[in-house]
């Protein structure tokens, strides 16, 4: 990695601008990319996406009806949260039959119809695979991967759904797959006290070194990759992908990619833009730290990915602020690799307010009415907002499984499609640019911070126009000199895409030495390449 230190001139003084480092990564311009390497993955929480039968709960036929929306959005692959048979204690993450569909979501025939329609639209379907455990109604709730029969049965699950036409799997909670083995007397060692809390009921009271992030788990992921590759070799067609959920230290997470002798996951999910910003605060500096922590550790030749939300987190527009919704969507689209969108992020949907009486999430229900909001994940799982009409067009039921978010009459697909400018239209423009720009597909990357809170990304490729991302994450306006970031930029840049609050005009030229940005304003600009300074 090449690093150049940025120095700002202010009132004749040379000031080191708050660790203003610009970082570069180089990508081969001639590399041939597989479909998943620049993909737009879109997570669907089936229970909240679209209800086709009026029971207040989303289902497979509802998803099938809305596949055209995903196609129009530019989605490459839709990832479905668990749809398997389950007592629904944890809304599908407690599976009682890995080979069938939860009845309230539909049937296997409904699933086949979904796959058929997705294939017609050239959309890929990825399933959530929950390998660590099954329902607590099962004889072996915590699956024992030291038993070869368990290992083979779970591989059989993968092959079964591959036979039904899925394009791959997102594997849930993988780091806890293996625990330490007992000693000769059959006793398990105790975890050490973490010192993080004095509450013995808090899961953070003990360390978890003995029950997660084990090397055996990495090896099991490699075995799953063999299943994917063997299926590909035998049946042909496009690559079947393996995506891994892991909230783990970088040194462990990166092992999931594999090494020189063995292939691993295509993409271990990158949650840095969630976790780092939660711990360090929302700022350009913390965004840079999040990007650094992934790209600095990324093994050579592997593909990055960027996630800003999911069904377990507060919605992105609520965490970062609605004014920064476009800026964050732009960021994950302009950084190298694949992007992952949680349903509703394209609209800047925000968290719903869920009362104790309406609470469904077991993590909250197991607490009490005074503290449930500390634990609930319900606010990010409210029904998808299709229209400004009854139940936001999600369902004809008298009551939906969760209440709607309060802003559904203005934040919805119908309204944002009709508007002259909207978060949805900006999102679609971003996807279109990603698909048409060789620079974004194959270009090298340089990024850094200007001043206190302006984040800048440059994507560049020989023979193609550079793409420049500039976002002001401050609460007030600022004027920046982009030469403080990169002296090889042309004197003027053309505006391609702007965030919703921007008053600038697409197609207009802007001087790089005095670019004014409103609070939360984000821009994608273009300029011809000039020679780089080493």
Image (tube, rainbow, N blue to C red):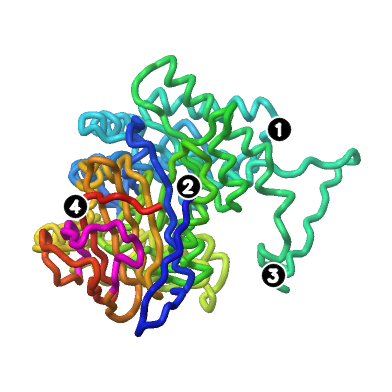
Residue 523 visible in this rendered orientation of the protein: yes
Q: Nearer the viewer, mark 4 or mark 3?
A: 4
User: Residue 53's mark?
Assistant: none
Report, in whole angstroms, how far the alpha carbon at label 4 lies from the one at label 1: 48 Å
User: Hey, which quadrant is residue 62 in on the image?
Assistant: top left
Q: Which residues are magenta?
A: 480-500
Q: Is residue 279 above or below residue 242?
A: below
Front residue of this view, candidates 294 and 268: 294
Q: Is residue 482 left or right of residue 453?
A: left
Residue 349: in sight, yes or no?
no
Q: Which residue is mark 4?
A: 429
Task: Answer above or below: position of 470 versus 137.
Answer: below
Q: Are marks 4 and 2 in contact (CB under 8 Å)?
A: no
- Does label 4 or label 1 sit earlier along the sequence? 1
Picture disc at residue 269: 2
Instruction: Determine the residue located farthest toward the bottom in the rendered image.
Output: 11
Does dot 2 land on a helix, a strand or a loop? loop
Judge by depth and name the residue closer to the eye, 465 or 350.
465
Name the spot of residue 458 as percent of width and height, x first. Answer: 32, 55
Report which residue position mark 1 lands on. Answer: 146
Residue contact between numbered discs 4 and 1, judged by CB atoms under 8 Å: no
Distance Cα–Cα, label 4 vs label 2? 24 Å
**Label whose residue precedes the other's in the sequence (3 or 1):** 1
Which residue has dot 3 on it? 196
Of the residues under marks 2 and 3, which one precedes in the sequence?
A: 3
């Amino acid at each position: 990695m090449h690093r150049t230190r940025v120095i700002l001139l202010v009132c004749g003084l040379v000031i080191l601008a708050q660790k203003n480092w610009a970082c570069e990564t180089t990508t081969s311009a001639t590399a041939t990319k597989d479909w998943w390497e620049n993909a737009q993955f879109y997570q669907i929480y089936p229970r909240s996406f679209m209800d086709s039968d009026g029971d207040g709960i989303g289902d497979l036929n509802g998803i099938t009806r809305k596949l055209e929306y995903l196609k129009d959005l530019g989605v490459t692959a839709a990832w479905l949260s668990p749809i398997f048979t389950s007592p629904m204690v944890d809304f599908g993450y407690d599976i009682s039959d890995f080979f069938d569909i939860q009845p309230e979501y539909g049937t296997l025939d409904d699933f086949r119809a979904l796959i058929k329609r997705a294939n017609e639209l050239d959309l890929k379907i990825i399933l959530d695979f929950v390998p660590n455990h099954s329902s607590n109604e099962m004889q072996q709730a915590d699956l024992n991967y030291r038993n070869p029969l368990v290992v083979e049965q779970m591989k059989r699950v993968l092959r079964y759904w591959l036979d039904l036409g899925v394009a791959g799997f997102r594997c849930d909670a993988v780091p806890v797959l293996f625990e330490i083995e007992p000693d000769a007397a059959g006793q398990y060692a105790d975890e050490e006290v973490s010192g993080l809390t004095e509450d013995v009921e808090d899961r953070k009271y003990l360390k978890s070194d003995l029950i997660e992030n084990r090397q055996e788990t990495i090896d099991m992921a490699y075995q799953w990759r063999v299943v994917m590759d063997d299926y590909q070799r035998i049946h042909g067609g496009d690559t079947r992908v393996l995506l891994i959920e892991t909230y783990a230290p970088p040194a462990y997470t990166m092992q999931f990619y594999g090494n020189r002798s063995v292939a691993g996951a295509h993409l271990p999910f990158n949650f840095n833009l969630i976790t780092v910003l939660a711990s360090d605060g929302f700022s350009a500096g913390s965004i840079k730290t999040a990007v650094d922590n992934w790209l600095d550790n990324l093994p050579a030749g592997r593909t990055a990915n960027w996630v800003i939300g999911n069904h377990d987190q507060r919605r992105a527009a609520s965490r970062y602020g609605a004014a920064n919704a476009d800026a964050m969507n732009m960021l994950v689209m302009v950084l190298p690799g694949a992007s992952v969108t949680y349903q509703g992020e394209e609209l800047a949907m925000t968290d719903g307010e869920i009362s104790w009486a309406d609470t469904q999430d077991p993590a909250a229900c197991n607490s009490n009415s005074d503290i449930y909001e500390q634990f609930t994940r319900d606010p990010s799982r409210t029904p998808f907002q299709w229209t400004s009409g009854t139940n936001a067009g999600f369902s004809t039921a008298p009551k939906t499984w969760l209440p709607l978010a309060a802003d559904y009459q203005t934040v919805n697909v119908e309204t944002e499609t009709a508007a002259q400018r909207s978060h949805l239209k900006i999102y679609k423009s971003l996807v279109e640019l990603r698909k048409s720009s060789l620079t974004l597909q194959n270009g090298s990357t340089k990024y850094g911070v200007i001043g206190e809170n302006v984040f800048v990304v440059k994507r560049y490729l020989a023979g193609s126009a550079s793409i420049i991302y500039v976002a002001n994450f401050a609460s007030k306006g600022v004027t920046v000199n982009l030469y403080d970031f990169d002296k090889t930029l042309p004197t003027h840049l053309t505006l391609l895409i702007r965030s919703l609050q921007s008053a600038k005009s697409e197609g207009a030229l802007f001087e790089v030495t005095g670019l004014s940005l409103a609070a939360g304003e984000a821009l994608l600009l273009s300029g011809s390449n000039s020679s780089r300074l080493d």
